[in-house]
Image (cartoon, helix red, strand yellow):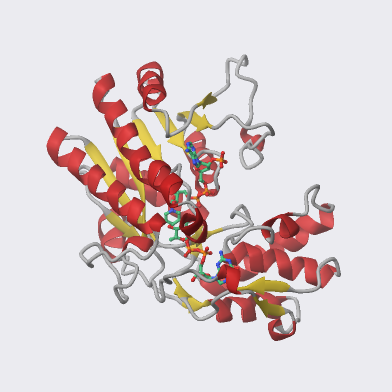
Amino acid sequence: MTKRALITGITGQDGSYLAELLLSKGYEVHGLIRRASTFNTHRIDHLYVDPHDPNAKLFLHYGDLSDGARMVTLMAEINPDEVYNLAAQSHVRVSFDEPEHTADTTGTGTVRLLEAVRLSGIKTRFYQASTSELFGATPPPQGEDTPFYPRSPYGVAKLYSYWITKNYREAYDMFAVNGILFNHESPRRGETFVTRKITRAVARIKAGVQKDVYLGNLDSIRDWGYAAEYVEGMWRMLQADEPEDFVLGTGSGITIRDFLETSFGHVGLDWQEYVKFDERYLRPTEVDALIADPSKAADKLGWVPTIHGKELAKLMVDADVEALEKGPDWIDTVKLASWGTA
Ligand code: NDP
Ligand code: GDR
């Protein structure tokens, strides 16, 4: 029997890796996409097969997490065995600019999807993309039992999603789980998250098409892993016998400064000559240090990541150097990014 999965956020970093993984396992994959005036499917274009082709296994549906009725019709239409809720306004800095929108998408969006599962009466397993941002001000190491203390509108919205997922599990006996994932990155990471902003800048500075890069706080510590490995952990959570929440992370953390040193050093440059400070990139409240205790996932899911922060920095720099060699971007996303606060 072919399994069917629905992925919200399929056009994002994680959605694209998860779609690849599930297709490789023989799933029929359905993805929710937002209508936009331009195409926003570049991360999944390589997976495209004409839906008229009998071998097509990937299907996209227009919808938005702000539209509860649409979630119900989609659930009934697709009848998925597994639902992965990855869609969110996922940028922490931007959540301070757009707190209400973030609450609506990143918070209330989750209950709309859970209600859609309940109201359509389908039997499905539900994965919620929870985050290490829930721990916020609570010092590391952070595991499943560490108290939450979110420090941004994004973190607070995700806290609601965490608890509503747990509540639906307990109230309605749903197989609904939270994956509490620490930062994970890749060459497909959005250009305004700090790792990708750095590795793109390194490639462009090395190639002589950019002079410098403006950043905010360089002291925070993050536990950075490789996104392609994390989607395997998501899938394993839904294959478990019992619905349980899991932390996924590498168990080691480095500062932004360390990431800079490794990234610039990888192409023979000294980061201190190119990095400038811009207070627009500071957050009103910062999360200083996130380092996972991923032992439960190792014990119960056999999930152990192999790529840690510094190795990841090199992998991402190599990918950005290669991408630039293939041709210039059709949009100067560095310029675009500097218009806002991200
Ligand atoms: P991205 O920002 O790359 O992707 C977010 C996805 O959500 C995109 O597909 C986006 O669509 C979609 N989306 C945003 N708003 C809506 C909406 N209102 N309705 C429908 N779809 C919407 O995030 P990541 O792939 O990095 O992360 C996936 C999830 O995991 C997110 O929920 C994030 O908060 C969470 N997370 C991420 C971590 C990380 O380190 N990457 C760590 C922990 C949790 P579009 O392409 O149209 O913008
Ligand atoms: P984060 O990732 O907030 O951890 O959220 P981000 O890469 O945005 O920031 C990490 C740290 O870098 C500092 N920083 C900067 N950040 C950005 N974006 N741009 C800058 O110029 C800059 N300069 C310094 C930040 O202050 C912060 O300390 C990510 C997202 O993917 C969330 O969706 C996810 O839940 C968490 O990871 C886990």
Q: Position of residue 288 (x, y in %)?
A: 41, 76
Q: Nearer the viewer, residue 74 or 322?
A: 74
Q: Position of residue 104 (x, y in %)?
A: 39, 42
Q: Is residue 238 above or below residue 60?
A: below
Q: Is residue 288 above or below residue 341?
A: below
Q: Is residue 241 left or right of residue 27?
A: left
Q: Nearer the viewer, residue 24 or 108?
A: 108
Q: Position of residue 95 (x, y in %)?
A: 47, 55
> Which residue is painted at 28% across and 49% down in the image?
160
Q: Is residue 245 visible?
A: yes
> Which residue is painted at 24% across and 20% down in the image?
121
> Which residue is painted at 63% across and 25% down in the image?
49
Q: Quadrant of residue 334?
A: bottom right
Q: Quadrant of residue 172?
A: top left
Q: Quadrant of residue 278?
A: bottom right
Q: Position of residue 80 (x, y in %)?
A: 36, 26
Please state, as top left, top right, bottom left or bottom right, where the N terminus lies in the image: top left
Q: Is residue 254 above or below residue 197?
A: below
Q: Is residue 153 left or right of residue 173?
A: right
**Label tally:** 0
Q: Nearer the viewer, residue 273 or 323?
A: 273
Please state, as top left, top right, bottom left or bottom right, where the C terminus lies in the image: bottom right
> Which residue is painted at 32% across and 72% down in the image?
137
Q: Nearer the viewer, residue 152 or 148?
A: 152
Q: Is residue 17 left or right of residue 332?
A: left
Q: Is residue 1 visible?
A: no
